[in-house]
Amino acid sequence: MASLIADVAHLGGREERGGILLGTRRGAHFHVVDATLPMIGDRGSRFAFRRGRAGHSEVARKRWLQSRHVVDWLGEWHSHPEAIPTPSGVDLNSWRSITDRRRAPMLFLILGYQASWMGVMQPGCAQPTKFAERERSPAGIGFAPA
């Protein structure tokens, strides 16, 4: 999380930034252990972020193989140029599509200047379940249902 927050603090005011979240699924719990930063081929603008075709999926596949199929693609993160972010209609449509194609719950994180927004989208659902930041320490950030 520290590298994501630093990336957004450095460049997030000019353009949206983003990447993927990698980790493990433990029942209903997600444990994020890694995330990708923007890569060559990604496109960010003041109001949108699009991942390129190759880089992030190559990292996910490499981590999947190295971990003997334990570390998986859990979801995506991106920034919004606002203090307290909320998902846009474009975000929600994209997340529904990703979740329905994947046929598994997926995690989505939006980083703003002062706060973060996190939700879990279930396949076939119109809206994600929102989670609120409950704890932040050098070990990470903990979220619980809002």
Image (cartoon, rainbow, N blue to C red):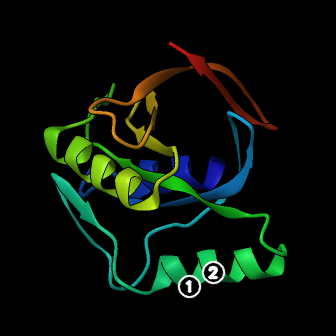
| Left or right side of 1 for 6 | left
Which residue is the site of mark 2?
A: 61
Label at residue 49 = none
Q: Amino acid at mark 1?
A: Glu
Residue 46: give x, y in percent of width and height.
16, 54
Residue at image coords 25%, 58%: 15
| Left or right side of 97 for 139 | right
Q: Are marks 2 and 1 in contact (CB under 8 Å)?
A: yes
What kind of element bears circle 2?
helix
- Of 3 and 145, nearer the camera is 145
Residue at image coords 56%, 16%: 145
Residue 90: give x, y in percent of width and height.
16, 47
Residue 111: give x, y in percent of width and height.
42, 40
Distance between mark 2 and mark 1 Cα atoms: 5 Å
User: Can the viewer see residue 33 in this picture?
Assistant: no
What kind of element bears circle 1?
helix
Q: Amino acid at mark 2?
A: Arg
Residue at image coords 33%, 85%: 41
Against 60, residue 112 (above or below) is above
| Left or right side of 39 for 86 | left
- Of 118 and 15, nearer the camera is 118
Furthest residue to the top?
146
Residue at image coords 72%, 75%: 63
Which residue is the site of mark 1?
A: 58
- Of 11 and 33, nearer the camera is 33
Q: Residues within 10 Å of mark 2 (few under 14, many from 20)?
A: some
Residue 30: give x, y in percent of width and height.
68, 41
User: Can the viewer see residue 41 in this picture?
Assistant: yes
